[in-house]
């Protein structure tokens, strides 16, 4: 599932760049630390649900926009919980 985290981070970085925001700008907008934003973008962080909401609000996108390309790829690969 490391690829999932990496792909989510890439999505955040692409949207942030399109908005002309630095990592520090985004961190300020959503009340998170700049190094945490960097960790998300590098796929090193499993982002808490509440922080995903803050990111979406700060980037002015819907939650569905953040996950638009994930359904078909990752739902089929998700292992069953025991």
Image (spheres, grey):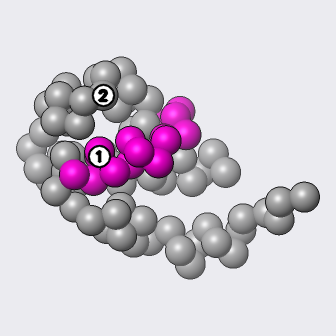
* In the image, residue 51 above or below residue 11: above
How far apart marks 2 and 1 lie (CA) works out to 9 Å
In magenta stretch: residue 49: yes
Q: Which residue is mark 2?
A: 32
Secondary structure beneath label 1: helix
Start-end of magenta stretch: 42-57
Name the residue at 29% across, 45% down: 54
Report x, y in % for residue 59: 19, 51
Report x, y in % for residue 74: 61, 67
- Quadrant housing residue 2: top right
Q: Which residue is mark 1?
A: 55
Q: Give the tally of numbered discs.
A: 2
In the picture as drawn, the residue positioned furthest to the right comes out as 82
Name the residue at 29% across, 46% down: 55
Can residue 67 be seen by looking at this rendering? yes
* In the image, residue 75 above or below residue 3: below
In the rendered structure, the answer to whether residue 7 lies left or right of residue 17 reads right
Name the residue at 19% across, 46% down: 58
Report x, y in % for residue 10: 39, 49
Can residue 6 be seen by looking at this rendering? no
Name the residue at 23% across, 37% down: 30
Secondary structure beneath label 2: loop
* In the image, residue 13 above or below residue 69: above
Q: Quarter of the image containing the C terminus?
A: bottom right
């Amino acid at each position: 599932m490391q690829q999932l985290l990496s792909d989510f981070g890439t999505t955040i970085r692409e949207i942030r760049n399109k908005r002309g925001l630095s990592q520090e700008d985004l961190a300020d907008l959503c009340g998170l630390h700049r190094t945490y934003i960097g960790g998300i973008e590098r796929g090193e962080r499993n982002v808490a649900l509440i922080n995903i909401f803050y990111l979406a609000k700060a980037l002015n996108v819907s939650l569905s926009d953040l996950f638009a390309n994930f359904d078909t790829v990752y739902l089929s690969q998700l292992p069953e919980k025991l």
